[in-house]
Image (cartoon, rainbow, N blue to C red):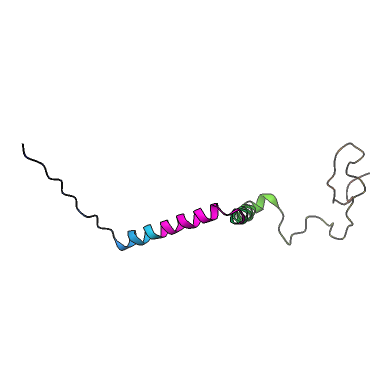
Amino acid sequence: MGATEVVVRPRVVSPFQASLRVALRRMQVVWVGIRHSRTAMVGLAILVLFIGMAVFAPWLAPYGPIERVADTSNCVPNISSVGDQRGGIRHLFTSNLGVPD
């Protein structure tokens, strides 16, 4: 029985694949550095929070930044009572326009 010889060809890597591998390795090194830094993680959490607020802004604030919700722009906030006489709870900073007392 003859011995079989295994031929191993050197793997040819394109320049794009090589630069991609280098970029991925650098991203791994940066991520490990961020993960081990408490300050960087807090900053990343704040950044993710702001991005989440921007994505969900239409549901968090359904009114536009210059849109008037009602004609309450010149009213004083009503902080006298949180609960009304009917047992319901009003928002702390709403006006009494249109609300019978």
Number of dots carrying numbers: 0
Estimate the x, y position of residue 13 in percent, counting from the top left: 28, 58
**The C terminus is located in which quarter?**
top right
Q: What segment is highlighted magenta in the picture?
A: 23-39
Q: Give 27 or 89, whichever is nearer the viewer.
A: 27
User: What residue appears at the point 9 percent right and 41 percent down from the top-left corner?
Assistant: 3
Is 19 positioned to the left or the right of 80 in the image?
Answer: left
37 is within the stretch colored magenta: yes
Estimate the x, y position of residue 98 in percent, counting from the top left: 88, 49
User: What residue appears at the point 89 percent right and 36 percent down from the top-left corner?
Assistant: 87
* Main secondary structure type of the part rendered in magenta: helix
Is 64 positioned to the left or the right of 45 in the image?
Answer: right
14 is within the stretch colored magenta: no
User: What residue appears at the point 85 percent right and 44 percent down from the top-left corner?
Assistant: 90
Q: Residue furthest left?
A: 1
Is 24 positioned to the left or the right of 42 in the image?
Answer: left
Estimate the x, y position of residue 77 in percent, counting from the top left: 88, 54
